Image (spheres, helix red, strand yellow):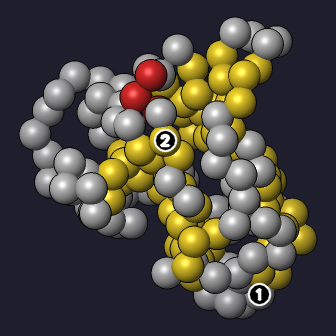
Amino acid sequence: MAVISGSNSILPDTRRGSVYLSALVKTSYGTSGETAAITGTDKFTSCIIQILIANISGGSPTLNVYLQQQAADQSSWYDIASMTQITANGNYIQSFVGGSAVGFTGTDKSLAAGSTKAVPVGGRQRLAFVYGGSMTSDITATIEYIQ
């Protein structure tokens, strides 16, 4: 899968004392892939993911969005949150709150839609996008990290 271009810098948000990351995904996209790694996320306790979809088209369009964290082996990634499956234009929001250390089986772009894992926030995260059908759309993805 290709890395989806965009910004992956954590920027200060002086309005609320939190930080945010924006412009992860370019518009008019229809190919599955992942954003570049977002580093330094272990300084935060939670995040809010916002996906804005416009101009959706195609046959039976679906989009699954996953928040992933890099494993200790520094090469594999696992899902820690999965948004409800997107099938129409709209503004979709998913929150993630880090939890206690727990044992679990890692999944890669297959965590049940609309669910999260109660795991601590790790140091490297990314968003993964899996398209179904023949979907194309304009997408804006943002993540706000909160201390």
Residue 92 in the image, given as x and y percentages of width and height = 69, 47
Report the side of 4 relative to 34 (left or right). right
Residue 69 visible within the image: yes
CB of mark 2 within 8 Å of CB of mark 1? no
Residue at the far left: name it.
103
Report the side of 20 relative to 37 (left or right). right
| Image point (39%, 66%), residue name | 109
Residue at the far right: name it.
55
Identify the mark at residue 35; answer none if there is no mark. Answer: none
Residue 99 in the image, given as x and y percentages of width and height = 29, 24
| Image point (19%, 56%), residue name | 73
**24 in relation to 145, above or below:** below
Among the 4 quarters of the image, the one containing residue 78: bottom left
| Image point (32%, 59%), residue name | 77
**41 in relation to 104, above or below:** above
Residue 114 in the image, given as x and y percentages of width and height = 46, 48
How far apart marks 2 and 1 lie (CA) works out to 34 Å
Badge 2 or badge 1: first in the primary sequence: 2
Q: Amino acid at mark 1?
A: Gly
| Image point (77%, 87%), residue name | 58
Residue 47 in the image, given as x and y percentages of width and height = 54, 30
Nearer the observer: mark 2 or 1; the answer is 2
Question: Tag count in the figure?
Answer: 2
Q: Amino acid at mark 2?
A: Thr
Residue 141 visible within the image: no
Report the side of 59 relative to 62 (left or right). right
Q: Observer-nearest residue: 113 or 41?
A: 41
Identify the mark at residue 39; answer none if there is no mark. Answer: 2
Q: Observer-nearest residue: 84 or 100?
A: 100
Structural crowding at the residue carrying mark 1, measured as other residues with C-alpha within 10 Å and reported as few (<14), some (14–19) or many (≥20): few
Q: Which residue is mark 1?
A: 58
